[in-house]
Amino acid sequence: MKELLYYQDVMLREFEATIVSKGTDEVGRHYVVLSNTAFYPTGGGQPHDTGTLDAIEVLDVEKINDEIRHYIQGDPSTLDGVVHGKLNWARRFDHMQQHAGQHILTAAFVELFNAQTVSFHLGSEHVTIDIATDTLTEQQLAAAEARANDIILENRPIQTTWITENELANYNLRKEVAVTGDIRLVIIPDFDYNGCGGTHPVSTGQVSAIKILGTEKMKGNVRVSFVCGQRVLSELAMRKEVLADVARQLSVPEVEAATALSKILVSQKNTEKALAAAKEELLAYEVKALVAGNEDVVAAAFNQRTMQELQKIARIIVIDNPDVTALLASENEGKLQFVAAKGKNVAKSMKVIAEKVLPLINGKGGGSDQMVQGGGECTISKEELLEVLQNAESHY
């Protein structure tokens, strides 16, 4: 392990090595094993490197037992003898920035609040750490972020050393190591001592910056999402674009966008309340018109009336008119819907009406003796549906 190129020189971008073996795994992926490699395999929360071997693309890298497999795109028979490896350096350096940033931010939470990290995930866009605490305040998050960025600005060296289990007591480790035998430590002097097999830059300054993006509860812990290095700039560019677009639509400067949006939302809520009140008033007039001249049954067919609206109309009718049955039908978005309701003085059960109507429209529905509702296919028109409802009610 100590002799692997990605441990010997983390900044190595290109190298030469000899093909040791070739193979195909159980799912048909072709791979080669090299005499040495600068390609980091997936492990310790850090994703694998990609790149090329000669002109062939390396898609994945995994450590299987004692060999590091380089999974390639294409036929491995074209690779033989000494090959030239070249890393996708943008991907590798991004992973090193994020991983080192995780060490720094995790150590900041430990130093300031004795809050340990219990898990770490390096995603393609964000990095997350799960902190063993019930809650983190905005003030704590800001303090940890500020401390982490201070460490970055100081440009402290990031050192690595190999030790044995017997030497562990000589180091003030942030947490116990889970491996035995040769143990690799990643050290930021006077700040963080941690067992880790990942790759990191040679100084904290190369992390560039850390920005916490948010938190969420996760199985009794607090998950902190953040980005480091180039990802900070990418995140800033994205948020700048979104903010500029919002400000442009609101016709205000960016610094006033939040205030302007808040005013619009308040205005919208007031408008929605006024509109709802107007709809209720209009509905009351509509119900009066429907009831006028009808003694026992109020029947009406509508276009594009929702089930909620039909139910509301029916309730208003039967509450104000205890001797009346309301039969309502509507065609809404290519479906037929109906509601049948009765006033408290009407002896009939609305369930019987639904049972007679639903088969005619291949429909489904339900309800009680007082009110039923249902919907189905447009096998007949809404007017014909209403007529069926009326016939069912009159022949009950």
Image (cartoon, rainbow, N blue to C red):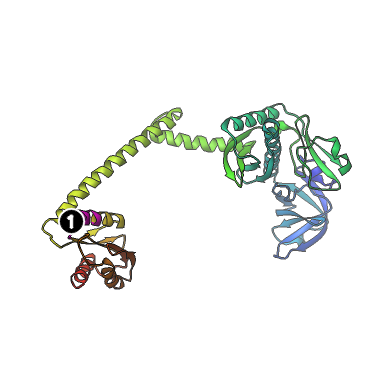
Task: Name the residue that disc number 1 marks.
Answer: 321
Q: Is residue 62 above or below residue 149?
A: below
Residue 227, picture quadrant = top right
**In the figure, is residue 304 to the left or right of 153?**
left
Q: Residues within 10 Å of mark 1 (few under 14, many from 20)?
A: some
**In the figure, is residue 218 to the left or right of 46?**
left
**Spot occupied by residue 89 in the image (x, y as percentages of width and height):** 70, 43
Name which residue lies at 30% across and 70% down: 358
Name which residue lies at 70% across and 60% down: 74
Name which residue lies at 46% across and 28% down: 255
Q: Quadrant of the C terminus?
A: bottom left
Magenta stretch: includes residue 321: yes
Q: Is residue 198 above or below residue 374?
A: above
**Spot occupied by residue 345 in the image (x, y as percentages of width and height):** 20, 61
Residue 299 visible here: no
Q: Secondary structure at mark 1?
A: loop
Magenta stretch: includes residue 90: no
What are the residue bounds of the magenta stretch? 314-323
Residue 125, picture quadrant = top right
Residue 267 visible here: yes
